[in-house]
Image (cartoon, helix red, strand yellow):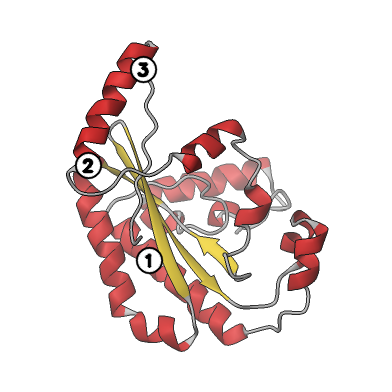
């Protein structure tokens, strides 16, 4: 099963929701087969319960995602760019036994795409503490693979740049996404001055948004 699509429908009442679901079902059956809606049912029942499990890949790999939010008009361009990026870097991906995937979510006029990279590497303390003890014990002795890690993180950075050049937005910018690069110089300087004024020693969350200097 190379692709799955799950749709969650909200409406003013049950009749309207059922009508919308029936319409989506009719479209889906033109191209595929209906399966049990186990994933949306599970997510709705316990929205954050699976967080410890998704810290790792399905085979015990390190899991590292990224994302971009695009207008619906750029949905195809973003998906095509992702697949093209995977193809262009297939040699590195294969050499380091990195696996990839991506999921998409369409909400209103927004299109979110979230590619992921998975590779075998030493499991850090943060992940081990979040996993259930039995699962963590099985992963505790995986050897370090710095080359695969460097390759995966480089791929992640490269794909993020592709997304940025397509004009995406990001949630959770924090310390990873290249925030300053896309700012107008005057705005960048204003933010630096504001940061220095409020936090002259740069001791509060240093490095966040690249404003620690």
Left or right placement of residue 204 versus residue 85 in this view? right
Q: Earlier in the sequence, mark 3 or mark 1?
A: 3
Picture quadrant of residue 84: bottom left
- Between label 2 and label 3, give the one nearer the viewer: 2
Left or right placement of residue 174 versus residue 15 in this view? right
117 over 112 or under it: above or below: below
Mark 1 residue element: helix
Q: 154 or 178, which is in the foreground?
A: 154
Mark 3 residue element: loop
The residue pinned by badge 3 equals 11
Picture quadrant of residue 79: bottom left
* Picture quarter with the N terminus: bottom left
* Total numbered badges shown on the rendered structure: 3
> Do the residues bearing badges 1 and 2 touch, measured as CB atoms within 8 Å?
no
Query: Distance between the Cα atoms at labels 2 and 3?
Result: 22 Å
Residue 123 lies, in percent from the top left, at 71, 71
Residue at point 33%, 49% (across, down)? 168
Residue at point 33%, 12% (across, down)? 15
199 over 86 or under it: above or below: above
Q: Residues within 10 Å of mark 3 (few under 14, many from 20)?
A: few
The residue pinned by badge 1 equals 159
Residue at point 30%, 30% (across, down)? 108
Mark 2 residue element: helix
Residue 55 lies, in percent from the top left, at 63, 58
The residue pinned by badge 2 equals 29
Query: Distance between the Cα atoms at labels 1 and 2?
Result: 33 Å
- Between label 1 and label 2, give the one nearer the viewer: 2
Query: Distance between the Cα atoms at labels 3 and 1?
Result: 36 Å
Q: 205 or 212, which is in the foreground?
A: 205
Q: 146 or 20, which is in the foreground?
A: 20
Residue 64 lies, in percent from the top left, at 54, 63
């Amino acid at each position: 099963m190379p692709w799955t699509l799950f749709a969650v429908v909200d409406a003013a009442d049950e009749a309207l929701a059922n009508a919308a679901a029936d319409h989506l079902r009719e479209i889906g059956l033109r191209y595929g087969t209906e399966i049990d809606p186990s994933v949306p049912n599970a997510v709705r029942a316990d929205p954050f319960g699976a967080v410890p499990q998704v810290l790792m890949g399905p085979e015990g790999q390190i899991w590292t995602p990224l994302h971009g939010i695009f207008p619906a008009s750029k949905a195809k361009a973003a998906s095509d760019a992702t697949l093209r990026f995977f193809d262009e870097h297939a040699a590195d991906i294969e050499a380091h036994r990195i696996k990839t995937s991506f999921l998409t979510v369409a909400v209103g006029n927004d299109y979110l795409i979230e590619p992921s990279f998975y590779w075998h590497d030493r499991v850090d303390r943060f992940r081990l503490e979040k996993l259930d003890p039995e699962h963590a014990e099985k992963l505790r002795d995986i050897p370090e693979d710095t080359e695969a890690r460097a390759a995966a993180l480089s791929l992640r950075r490269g794909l993020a740049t592709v997304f940025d050049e397509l004009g995406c937005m990001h949630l959770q910018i924090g310390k990873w996404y290249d925030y300053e690069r896309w700012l107008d110089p005057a705005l960048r300087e204003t933010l630096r001055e504001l940061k220095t004024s409020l936090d002259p020693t740069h001791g509060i969350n240093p490095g966040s948004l690249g404003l620690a200097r």
